């Protein structure tokens, strides 16, 4: 496992680096067959806003053969944030391992709960959109991978986001899977 540690608004002491490395190596030993040989990116940052009490943030991203496991945790202490991330990653990797090996054993997957998209999306017109002010503050570029919507739900669970963009292997079109408030998933497909 190759670990890259970077910091923002924090001096990365050797003790801090060793603590992160030790925590991640313990995960590596526990899940050696899952994450051995993969890249791990760690970002430690401190927010300078005095109003934010949980200003020590630890973000870890593990890149697994086209899949990503990501966790971000914040607390008042950087070492506590690292502990929280390690605990969360332990649960996420176990979940990934269980689903991965279940699919290898050719067990049937449960149905994907896809709601009626038209019922779940808010209806707005152009004038309402113009009233909302906002700006793009961050832009990301990433490679899309072909997969089924069921596989996309697994990725969504692993990265802790509300949505996941992918290429639907059945239609070769860009789709988005998202987590609904009721705990089910929604699938957004383009109309051709």
Image (cartoon, rainbow, N blue to C red):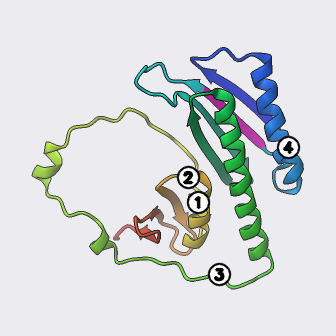
Instruction: Name the residue tied to disc 2.
Output: 160
Q: Position of residue 72 (x, y in %)?
A: 59, 41
Q: Which residues are magenta?
A: 39-44
Residue ranking furthest to the left: 127
The reply to whether residue 37 is in sight is: no
- Left or right: 163 with respect to 142? left
Task: Look at the image and say whether residue 43 sits in the magenta stretch.
Answer: yes
- The residue indicated by pointer 3 is 109
Q: Position of residue 141 (x, y in %)?
A: 52, 41
Query: Could you give the CA–CA distance between mark 1 and mark 2, rounded to whole angstroms?
Result: 6 Å
Task: Please identify, in this view, whether the residue under mark 4 or under mark 2 is nearer the observer.
Answer: 4
Mark found first going from the N terminus, 4 or 1: 4
Element under disc 2: loop
Judged left or right of residue 1, residue 186 is: left
Q: x%, y% of residue 138?
A: 43, 34
- Element at label 3: loop
Judge from the rendering whether residue 7 lies leftward or rightward of residue 127; answer left or right.
right
Residue for point 67% across, 42% down: 85
Residue at the image point whose x is 80% and y is 79% from the top: 105
Q: Residue at x 13, y 53 (%)?
A: 126
Callout 4 environment at 10 Å: few (<14), some (14 to 19), or many (20+)? few
Of marks 2 and 3, which one's residue comes earlier in the chain? 3
Sort mark 2 into few (<14), some (14-19) or many (20+) by Cα contacts within 10 Å.
some
Locate residue 14, reporting x and y percent: 80, 17
Distance between the alpha carbons at the discs numbered 2 and 3: 21 Å
Marks 2,3: beta carbons within 8 A:
no
Q: Quadrant of the N terminus?
A: top right
Q: Which mark is residue 96?
A: none
**Which label lies toward us, 3 or 4?**
4
Q: Residue at x 66, y 51 (%)?
A: 68
What separation in Å lies between label 4 and label 1 (alpha carbons)? 22 Å
Mark 3 or mark 1, which is nearer the start of the sequence? Answer: 3
């Amino acid at each position: 496992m190759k670990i890259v540690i970077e910091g923002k608004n924090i001096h990365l002491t050797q003790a801090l680096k060793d603590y992160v490395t030790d925590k991640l190596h313990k995960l590596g030993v526990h899940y050696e067959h899952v994450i051995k040989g993969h890249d791990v990116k760690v970002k430690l940052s401190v927010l300078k806003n005095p109003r934010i009490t949980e200003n020590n943030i630890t973000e870890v991203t593990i890149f697994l053969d086209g899949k990503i496991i990501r966790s971000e945790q914040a607390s008042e202490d950087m070492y506590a944030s690292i502990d929280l991330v390690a605990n969360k990653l332990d649960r996420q990797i176990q979940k990934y391992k269980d689903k991965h090996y279940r699919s290898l054993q050719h067990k049937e997957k449960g149905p994907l709960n896809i709601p009626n998209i038209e019922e779940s999306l808010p209806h707005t017109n152009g004038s309402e959109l113009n009233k909302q002010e906002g700006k793009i503050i961050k832009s990301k570029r990433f490679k899309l991978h072909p997969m089924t919507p069921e596989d996309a739900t697994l990725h969504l669970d692993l990265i802790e986001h509300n949505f996941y963009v992918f290429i639907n292997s059945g239609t070769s079109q860009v789709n988005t899977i998202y987590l609904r408030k009721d705990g089910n998933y929604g699938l957004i497909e383009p109309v051709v």
